[in-house]
Amino acid sequence: MKQGLSIGDVARRTGLSVSAIRFYESRGLVKPDRRPSGQREFARADIRRLSFILIAQQMGLTIEEISEVLSDLPDNRTPTKADWTRISQHFRKRLDDHIAMVERLRNRLDGCIGCGCLSLKTCKLYNPDDRARAAGPGPRFVMTGESVSPQA
């Protein structure tokens, strides 16, 4: 019988703290078995699962979003390439949207971000009469890709 990994082993392999692993367990993201002594026993597949969680969080996904995606993975076997491909397709659109937003930010960093502040001298050109305010609060041009033509 193959022996599972202790929580300390998983922490060393993933770089996560033991408390973080316990948190993810409490949220149902990993489901270790219990040894007769009561200690947690993790499958090797949990290392991939936890690594995926870290990457997903770095992408800005919430624990709830990560939980939803991981709910489709098998608990009792290592995820296959097909499993991971299916999950990655879920994130592709989100990543593409995020990349587009970062590119807009880079391209407009020295100009108007559409916040409606009218504090920059150039706002009279980019956002005359505070027209961006009609689109809603916040940095409209960077976040949504909207623009207000100076002639509009």
Image: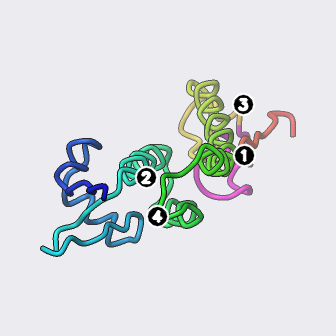
Which residue is under mark 1?
Answer: 129
Which numbered disc flags the more N-terminal residue, 1 or 2? 2
Q: Are marks 3 and 1 in contact (CB under 8 Å)?
A: no
Tell me if residue 122 comes above or below residue 22 in the rendering. above
Please provide percent x and percent y for residue 45. 41, 52
Characterize the local packing of mark 1: few (<14), some (14-19) or many (20 or more) Cα atoms within 10 angstroms: few
66 left or right of 107? left
Q: CA distance from mark 1 to mark 2?
A: 51 Å
Q: Does the magenta run of residues contain 130?
A: yes
Which residue is under mark 2?
Answer: 49
Give the residue furthest to the left.
37
Residue at figure coordinates x 58%, y 48% from the top left: 80
58 left or right of 18? right
Q: Are marks 1 and 4 in contact (CB under 8 Å)?
A: no
Magenta stretch? 127-144
Which numbered disc flags the more N-terminal residue, 4 or 3? 4
Which residue is under mark 3?
Answer: 125
Q: Amino acid at mark 4?
A: Asn
